[in-house]
Image: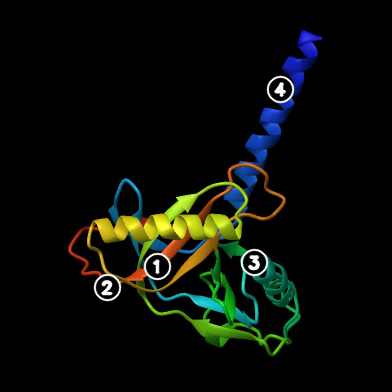
């Protein structure tokens, strides 16, 4: 019986390790530069990126993640005028408000607005984001509206403690498919007015 549990433990460890390995290996992540690292948060510079975006009358994470993902996934899985599949990237961007909320997929770096196929669904738009400085706080597990509010408040308090000015909505970044059970990563970000007087560290 002891040998059985040892073997089972080894199998489970291999499954967990393989989930993390394949998720990391196969998915392109949006590029950014680290400007400053704090105990509670990180300041990053995101260069412009091409995104597919959908706006919906969704007021919470569950509503937006369900209906928004279906529309955007349809676009990248061939729902476009070229019947072309486009690789999934991370993170998925969500801006959740009490009225109209948005979800965005970052397009792979090889694409710009002028070389992407046109979405069949007119509610999906292709946009290029502006360069932005943001503060970021991270948490694990499966995200919920309660988590998003909790970590947005933690980030807000940390920025106010250091007298760092921020503006706009606190947004959610999701990195993992629902089928990835371990090693999950979520982030809350908010825009800053930041003067780049430090040497950034590049991340891909």
Q: Position of residue 139 (x, y in %)?
A: 50, 49
Residue 171 as seen in the image, left or right of residue 132: right
Q: How many marks?
A: 4
Nearer to the camera, 131 or 85: 131
Q: Farthest residue in the bottom direction?
A: 122
Instruction: Say left or right for 24 vs 135.
Output: right
Disc 4 from disc 3: Cα separation: 34 Å
The answer, for residue 203, to whether it is visible in the render is: no
Q: Closer to the camera: disc 2 or disc 3?
A: 2
Q: Nearer the viewer, mark 3 or mark 1?
A: 1
Q: Is disc 4 placed on a helix, strand or loop?
A: helix
Task: Say whether residue 75 is left or right of residue 176.
Answer: right
Q: Is residue 119 above or below residue 184?
A: below
Please tell me which of labels 2 and 3 falls first in the chain: 3
Circle 3 is placed at which residue position? 87
- For the C terminus, the quadrant is bottom left
The furthest residue to the left: 197
Give the number of the mark in front: 4 or 3.
Answer: 4
**In 3D space, how far apart are the residues under numbered discs 1 and 4 (Cα atoms)?**
41 Å
Q: Along the line of sight, which residue is nearer the eye, 191 or 5?
A: 191
Residue contact at pointers 3 and 1, CB within 8 angstroms = no
The answer to whether the residue labelled 4 contacts the one labelled 2, judged by CB atoms less than 8 Å apart, is no
Q: Which residue is mark 1?
A: 190
Give the Cα separation between the discs numbered 2 and 3: 32 Å
Task: Say the numbered circle drawn on residue 9.
Answer: 4
Q: Residue at x 71, y 29 (%)?
A: 12
Report how far apart the C-alphas of labels 1 and 2 lie in the structure.
10 Å
Residue drawn 29% across the image and 49% down it = 38
On the image, the x and y values in percent for residue 93 come to: 54, 68
């Amino acid at each position: 019986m002891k040998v059985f549990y040892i073997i089972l433990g080894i199998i489970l460890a291999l499954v967990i390790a393989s989930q993390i390995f394949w998720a990391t290996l196969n998915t392109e992540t949006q590029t950014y530069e680290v400007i400053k690292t704090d105990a509670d948060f990180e300041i990053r510079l995101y260069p412009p990126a091409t995104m597919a975006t959908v706006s919906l009358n969704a007021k919470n994470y569950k509503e937006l993640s369900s209906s928004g993902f279906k529309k955007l996934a349809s676009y990248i899985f061939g729902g476009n005028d070229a019947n072309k599949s486009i690789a999934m990237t991370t993170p998925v961007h969500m801006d959740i408000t009490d009225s109209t909320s948005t979800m965005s997929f970052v397009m792979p770096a090889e694409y710009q607005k002028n070389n992407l196929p046109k979405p069949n669904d007119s509610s999906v738009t292709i946009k290029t984001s502006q360069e932005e400085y943001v503060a970021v706080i991270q948490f694990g597990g499966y995200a919920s509206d309660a988590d998003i509010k909790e970590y947005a408040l933690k980030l807000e308090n940390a920025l106010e403690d250091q007298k760092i000015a921020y503006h706009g909505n606190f947004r959610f970044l999701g990195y993992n498919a629902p089928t990835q059970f371990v090693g999950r990563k979520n982030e809350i970000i908010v825009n800053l007015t930041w003067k780049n007087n430090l040497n950034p560290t590049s991340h891909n």
